[in-house]
Image (cartoon, rainbow, N blue to C red):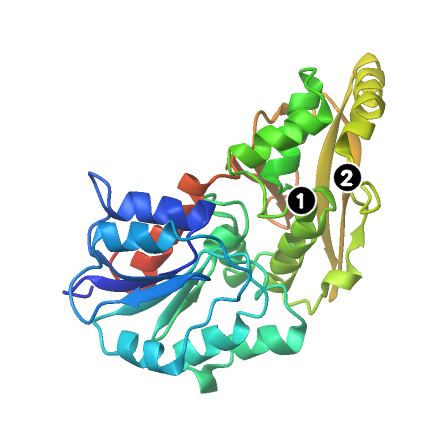
Amino acid sequence: MGTENASVFLVGTGVVGSAVLAIAHGATPPAHVTLAGVANTRGLSLVESGAISPDEARAIASRPASTEPVTITDDVLDALAKRASPVLVDATAADDMEDLYVRALARGIHVVTANKKPLAAPWAKRARLFDETHRAPGTKLRYEATVGAGLPVIETLKDLVRTGDRVRRIECVLSGTLGFVVNELDAGTPFSRAVAIAKDRGYTEPDPREDLGGKDVARKAVVLARELGSRLEIADVDLEPFVPASVKDLEKLDAELAAKVARLRTRGEKLVYLARIEAEGTTVRASAGPLAVPLDHPAATLRGSSALVAFTTARYDRDPLVVRGSGAGGAVTASALFADILKATGRT
């Protein structure tokens, strides 16, 4: 275990990043962690020693929004690398972060991320992240928060694989947003209103269309499939959106979806958005889409924004191994990031 605190440089101050700041500067901040700096599209600050002040972090987080990308120069990474147990934390949903990760890992900076896009990037880009020849010895990349927010999904799957179990099927409700929306529909809330509530509560991606189109679920399915050794790409996922991209006015779907939910209820069924990863030998297939399931199906018992991942394996054959709980929201995702910080730096 390290003797000095981990030095954390937080990139992104949206829903998840703001939750990281709230925990770091709260009454009971995690032990062994120092928030050394903060960056977003509007500004950046990294202190040479000690912790960035709450006022300075809040000032950066509260600056007017910008459409510019987050830019972290080599000079900033060099300065971070000089600190004890440096960790770069990606709390964004930004594209093209793979190069930043590689540059950080090469300098001995651990990378902890909630951003699933680098893990679901085209295989060649993703492979660079795991190429040990590009990393300083002992440097870790941890990404538990990319699937299921604070739920131990990635680590559970890794444990199954590395202990020699044979994963045959993974069934998942992976979108806290869509889970919340279908549960609100079941309770009689108009669809457009349910989406607005989900966004207000921080369940959605910055652009809710990522959730409604199912692409966010497809990325998570790719992340899980790749833990099985597959080179599956997002384009390989058999994806059916919850809402087609052509629909711009969500209110136009309110009556249609309310009627659909009512019809399913009379048949003893419930609408869910389910992802499936199926492995047979070296072949791995993935799909995601809306599905009517019986009311006794595990996915039908979820409430609110809860998520569920069921692993059917050679060992867990008749009774799958199930991980379930809150699957969306800044606080639980931030908790997973802090847990990964501690694990990456050997402080647990």
**Residue 242, numbered label:** 2
Image vertical order of residue 187 relative to residue 92, above or below: above
* Quadrant hosting residue 29: top left
Total marks drawn? 2
Q: Out of 102 and 95, give the one closest to the viewer.
A: 95
Front residue of 323 and 197: 197
Q: Quadrant of residue 128?
A: bottom right
Residue 315, image x, y percentages: 59, 48
Query: Badge 2: few (under 14), some or many (20 or more) residues near its Cα, within 10 Å?
Result: some
Quadrant housing the N terminus: bottom left
Q: Name the foreground residue: 272 vs 199.
A: 199
- Viewer-proximal residue among 105 and 68: 68
Please, what is the three-letter code of the amino acid marked with disc 1?
Asp
Side of 185 relative to 102 (left or right): right
Classify mark 1: residues with Cα within 10 Å, few (<14), some (14-19) or many (20+). Answer: many
Residue at 44% x, 42% y: name it: 330
Residue 276, label in figure: none
Q: Which residue reaches farthest top?
A: 266
Counting from the top left corner in percent of width and height, residue 161 is at: 55, 60
Say which residue label 1 marks: 211
Secondary structure of the residue carrying tag 1 is helix
CA–CA distance between discs 1 and 2? 8 Å
Report x, y in % for residue 246: 84, 45
Quadrant location, the C terminus: bottom left
